[in-house]
Image (tube, grey):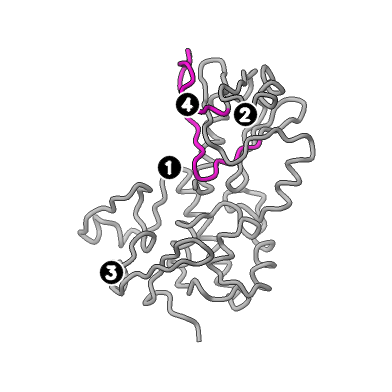
Amino acid sequence: MPEGHSIHRLAAEHRRLFVGGPVGAESPQGRFAEGARSLDGRVLVDADAYGKHLLLGFEDERVLHVHLGIYGRFVFGGLPAPAPVGAVRLRLTGAADYGDLRGPNACEVLEPGGVKVLRDRLGPDPLRADADPDRAWARISRSRAPVAVLLMDQAVVAGPGNIYRAEVLFRQGVDPLLPGRRLDRGVWSAIWADLVVLMAEGVRVGRIDTVRPEHTPEAMGRAPRVDDHGGEVYVYRRAGLPCLVCGVEVRQAEVAARNLFWCPGCQPPVA
């Protein structure tokens, strides 16, 4: 599933291609036909992201809400657009470009007030200027759940996924199984600050890089990482390999139905 930085990049692409003019909307697949008709020809006035949710604001306060889920993706191109191929849930057409949406988990038109309902159920997004990390801390500091589980809960923090979760806990030396209520407030502040920096860099470059300069392939004389997700990381999908910092074998375990990666040398349990 795309992590939050990808959705912020997607919002920026919609702003670049479509905001400020009327947008054609159709549902070649037919599953979003009524919603597309309600948006067709309206001016797109804003494109925003909150966590893993894309929010496209049209005139008259209607908002298109898209959550890509595991299989969803947008593909863009210049006009004239080719005939739709496959299950295109939504096609948006601007003055010079089009965008096709396939396989989203959610694609719906929200009436006025619907965005607030959505945002109220989400935690703060590290990529937003209006984010309040104290909201997340209020839930974390009362929870018996492991901090690794809490960081994946979008109601606690909106945006980070499995990669950012594993990497930020490694970078801050936090045992992923530590209960939230035992996490030090200063450590939480460092985790949040790190997420802000790492995710902003993800928006800038379009991939997730988390290693510090001294641990890059060039600095260490090692081969670059080869993985579908791209980017240089410390522990994500490195189970069984030596830690880049201490040399201890990176571990993997299933926690709350997701694979967790950590280094027991750099992230020892707290007594």
Q: What element carries label 4?
A: loop
Name above or below for residue 92 compared with residue 124.
above
Q: What element carries label 2?
A: loop
Three-letter amino acid code at the position of disc 3: Pro
Residue behind mark 2: 31
- Residues shaded magenta: 65-89
Q: Position of residue 70 (x, y in %)?
A: 50, 45
Marks 3, 2: nearer the viewer: 2
Q: Which residue occupies the extreme bottom position in the image?
A: 271
Q: What element carries label 3?
A: loop
Three-letter amino acid code at the position of disc 4: Gly
Q: Where is residue 61 in the image (x, y as percent from the top left)?
A: 76, 30
Q: Distance between the residues labelled 4 and 3?
A: 43 Å
Residue behind mark 1: 206
The residue lying at 73 percent from left, 25 percent from top is: 59
**How dense is the environment of label 4, judged by Cα within 10 Å: few (below 14), some, or many (20 and up)?**
few
Marks 4, 1: nearer the viewer: 4
Task: Count the numbered circles shown.
Answer: 4
Circle nearer the N terminus (4, 2): 2
Would you say residue 260 sits in the magenta stretch? Answer: no
Three-letter amino acid code at the position of disc 1: Gly
The residue lying at 45 percent from left, 43 percent from top is: 204
Frontmost residue, 134 versus 115:
115
Frontmost residue, 64 versus 129:
64
Circle nearer the N terminus (4, 3): 4
Circle nearer the N terminus (1, 2): 2
Circle nearer the N terminus (4, 1): 4
Q: How far apart are marks 4 and 2 (CA)?
A: 13 Å
Residue behind mark 4: 86
